[in-house]
């Protein structure tokens, strides 16, 4: 794992015991995300784990979805069923990390760090974590066609945030998102960014508390 990553995100809390089944691409929620996420993930998996690591995942996908797994023909700005991306991460967690879902923190962190362009990274380097998080919320629909990311309370050096109306109830997805949120906040001028709250408050609401120095 990324050094210190597990120490920077608390254990995932699900006090309401919302059912969190595995990601099933054959039963889509209807939510979509931009294709560059899957494109970058497949490139990352090949470079880190080997050229054949994703083949078993491809073979178990419904036939109509398998065409999206060929990176040469994957349109980065097109919309794809979100289950493709998160089921691919779940495959990596199971096959390369002994099923430890917290490995998805690292994957999400790596994907977000890769997606942040030089221009935005320069601009965000002058901002605080809540400001960067707010900017991420504004651009949320550039990644997903559903949901809302919002800062609800600012008391530097902490802030509360929420991910609302998230349709995919999967533990691996929440961990990937937590890792990606930290990567975005690390692009700010703050240091030692971490989460002190990581809780599924209700079926469609993920609540976070951000802390930095």
Image: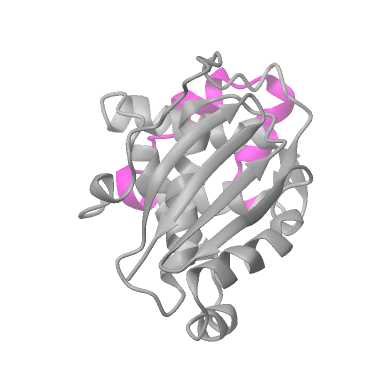
* Residue positioned most to the front: 155
Report the label total: 0
Residue 86 percent coordinates (x, y):
55, 34
Locate the C terminus and report the quarter of the image it occupies.
Answer: bottom left
Residue 9 percent coordinates (x, y):
34, 45
Image vertical order of residue 115 relative to residue 163, above or below: below
Image vertical order of residue 25 relative to residue 134, above or below: above
Quadrant of residue 211 in the image?
bottom left
The colouring scheme, among rainbow, by chain, secondary structure or one colour, is one colour
Residue 174 percent coordinates (x, y):
50, 36
Quadrant of residue 154 in the image?
bottom right
Query: In this view of the protein, can residue 36 be seen by the observer?
Result: yes
**Residue at image coords 33%, 43%:** 50
Image vertical order of residue 49 relative to residue 187, above or below: above
Q: Nearer the viewer, residue 25 or 144?
A: 144
Q: Is residue 211 magenta?
A: no
**Residue at image coords 63%, 24%:** 203
The range drawn in magenta is 46-72
Left or right of 192, for residue 210: right
Q: Is residue 54 magenta?
A: yes
Residue 204 percent coordinates (x, y):
67, 30
Is the stretch drawn in magenta largely helix, strand or loop?
helix
**Residue at image coords 47%, 23%:** 14
**Residue at image coords 36%, 53%:** 47
Left or right of 96, for residue 205: right
Query: In this view of the protein, can residue 113 be seen by the observer?
Result: no
């Amino acid at each position: 794992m990324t050094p210190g990553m597990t120490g920077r995100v608390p254990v995932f809390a699900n006090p309401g015991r919302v059912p969190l089944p595995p990601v099933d691409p054959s039963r889509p929620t209807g939510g979509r995300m931009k294709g560059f996420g899957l494109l970058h993930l497949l490139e990352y998996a090949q470079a880190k784990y080997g050229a054949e690591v994703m083949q078993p995942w491809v073979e178990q996908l419904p036939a109509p979805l398998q065409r999206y797994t060929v990176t040469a023909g994957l349109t980065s700005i097109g919309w794809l069923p979100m289950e493709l991306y998160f089921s691919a991460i779940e495959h990596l967690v199971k096959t390369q990390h002994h099923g430890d879902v917290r490995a998805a923190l690292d994957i999400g962190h790596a994907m977000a760090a890769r997606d942040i362009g030089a221009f935005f990274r320069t601009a965000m380097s002058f901002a605080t974590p809540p400001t960067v998080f707010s900017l991420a919320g504004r651009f949320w629909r550039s990644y997903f066609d559903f949901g809302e990311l919002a800062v609800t309370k600012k008391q530097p050096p902490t802030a509360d945030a929420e991910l609302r109306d998230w349709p995919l109830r999967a533990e691996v997805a929440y961990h990937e998102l937590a890792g990606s949120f930290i990567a975005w906040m690390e692009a700010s001028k703050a240091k030692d960014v971490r989460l002190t709250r990581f809780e599924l408050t209700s079926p469609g609401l993920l609540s976070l508390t951000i802390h930095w120095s």
